[in-house]
C-alpha cells in the first residue's frame, strides 16, 4: 500500500526489526537514494512487484542496483497460472533471494506457489479494513480459517505464511500467530501516522490522513489515470485520524 508501505515507515520499523513491503510506485532513483542513505534497512525491506513485463524489468534493475534481499510478488488474487509462472520466472532470475507471493486462501494454491518457487505465501482475500473484494467480486475466505489451512500446507513443504489483512488490534495479531502464521502483515494499524503516505487534512479542527486499498478507484486513478473499463474498484477510501509518529 502506498499509504503505509513507505520508505519513511521502513526506516522506523527497521529499528524494531520489523519488515516493510515497499510499494512499487517509487522510482529507481528514489530506491537508490534511500538504500544508500539507509543500508541498515536492507535486511528489513521487500520490494513489491506485480506480474507485468514492465514490473519484471523494473524488479530486475532494482534488485541488482540496490542489492535487495527480499521480493514481494503482490496481486489481489493469486489464482492464475500466469501468477505461478511469474514466480517461476523470478525464482530463475534470483535463485537466492527470498520471495513472498500472494494472495491466496487455500491449501492447494499455497502448495502450488511454494513449488513454483515462493518461500513465503501471503494469505488473505478480502479481510482488509479498506477492501471490498468480498462484496464486489463475491470472492473471499474467513481469515482465521484461511491461515489455519494455508499454514498447515506451507509448513509441510518447508514454507512459511503471512497473514495479510483484518487486524485492527494486537489481539487480532495474536489470533493470526495462534492459527499458524509465521508473519502478520498490517496496513490499517499503521495508517494515519507521520511516516504514512498522503497529506494531512484538517476538518473542523481535527487532523486526518487518507487511507485506501491499492485496488480502490483512488489508487487506480492515481497511478493509471482511470479505472479500466474491464475492472471495478475493490477498495474504499477513508480518512484516518492523524496519529503522529509511528
Image (cartoon, grey):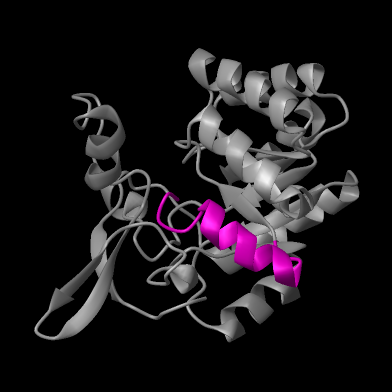
Query: Image point 34% across, 48% down: which residue?
Result: 138
Q: Nearer the viewer, residue 3 or 65?
A: 65
Q: Is residue 205 left or right of residue 32?
A: left
State the count of labels: 0
Query: Image point 78% across, 23% down: which residue?
Result: 91
Q: Nearer the viewer, residue 24 or 117?
A: 24
Q: Is residue 96 left or right of residue 226?
A: right
Residue 175 lies, in percent from the top left, at 65, 78
| Residue 18 visible to an observer of this rendering | yes
Q: Nearer the viewer, residue 17 or 83?
A: 17
Query: Image point 84% across, 47% down: which residue?
Result: 159
* Magenta span of residues: 1-18
Residue 233 sits inside the magenta stretch:
no
Query: Image point 52% across, 13% down: which residue?
Result: 53
Q: In the image, is residue 27 above or below residue 153?
A: above
Q: Is residue 244 left or right of residue 40?
A: left
Residue 238 lies, in percent from the top left, at 24, 65
| Residue 74 visible to an observer of this rendering | no
Residue 215 lies, in percent from the top left, at 34, 43
Q: Quadrant of residue 118?
A: top right
Q: Quadrant of residue 68?
A: top right
Amino acid at each position: 500500500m502506498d499509504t503505509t508501505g513507505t520508505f519513511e515507515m521502513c526506516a522506523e520499523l527497521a529499528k524494531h526489526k520489523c519488515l516493510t513491503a515497499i510499494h512499487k510506485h517509487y522510482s529507481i532513483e528514489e530506491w537508490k537514494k534511500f538504500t544508500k542513505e539507509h543500508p541498515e534497512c536492507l535486511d528489513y525491506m521487500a520490494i513489491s512487484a506485480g506480474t507485468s513485463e514492465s514490473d519484471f524489468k523494473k524488479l530486475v534493475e532494482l534488485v541488482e542496483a540496490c542489492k535487495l534481499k527480499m521480493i514481494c510478488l503482490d496481486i489481489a488474487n493469486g489464482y492464475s497460472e500466469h501468477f505461478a509462472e511469474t514466480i517461476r520466472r523470478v525464482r530463475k532470475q534470483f535463485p537466492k533471494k527470498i520471495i513472498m507471493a500472494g494472495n491466496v486462501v487455500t491449501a492447494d494454491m499455497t502448495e502450488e506457489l511454494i513449488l513454483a518457487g515462493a518461500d513465503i505465501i501471503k494469505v488473505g482475500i478480502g479481510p482488509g479494513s479498506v477492501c471490498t473484494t468480498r462484496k464486489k467480486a463475491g470472492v473471499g475466505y474467513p481469515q482465521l480459517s484461511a491461515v489455519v489451512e494455508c499454514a498447515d500446507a506451507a509448513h509441510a513443504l518447508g514454507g512459511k505464511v503471512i497473514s495479510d489483512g483484518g487486524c485492527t488490534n494486537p489481539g487480532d495479531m495474536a489470533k493470526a500467530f495462534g492459527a499458524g502464521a509465521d508473519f502478520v502483515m498490517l496496513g490499517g494499524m499503521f495508517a494515519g501516522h507521520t511516516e504514512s503516505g498522503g497529506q494531512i487534512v484538517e476538518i473542523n479542527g481535527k487532523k486526518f490522513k487518507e487511507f485506501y486499498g491499492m485496488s480502490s478507484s483512488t489508487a487506480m486513478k492515481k497511478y493509471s489515470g482511470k479505472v479500466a473499463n474491464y475492472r471495478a474498484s475493490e477498495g474504499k477510501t477513508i480518512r484516518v485520524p492523524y496519529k503522529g509518529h509511528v
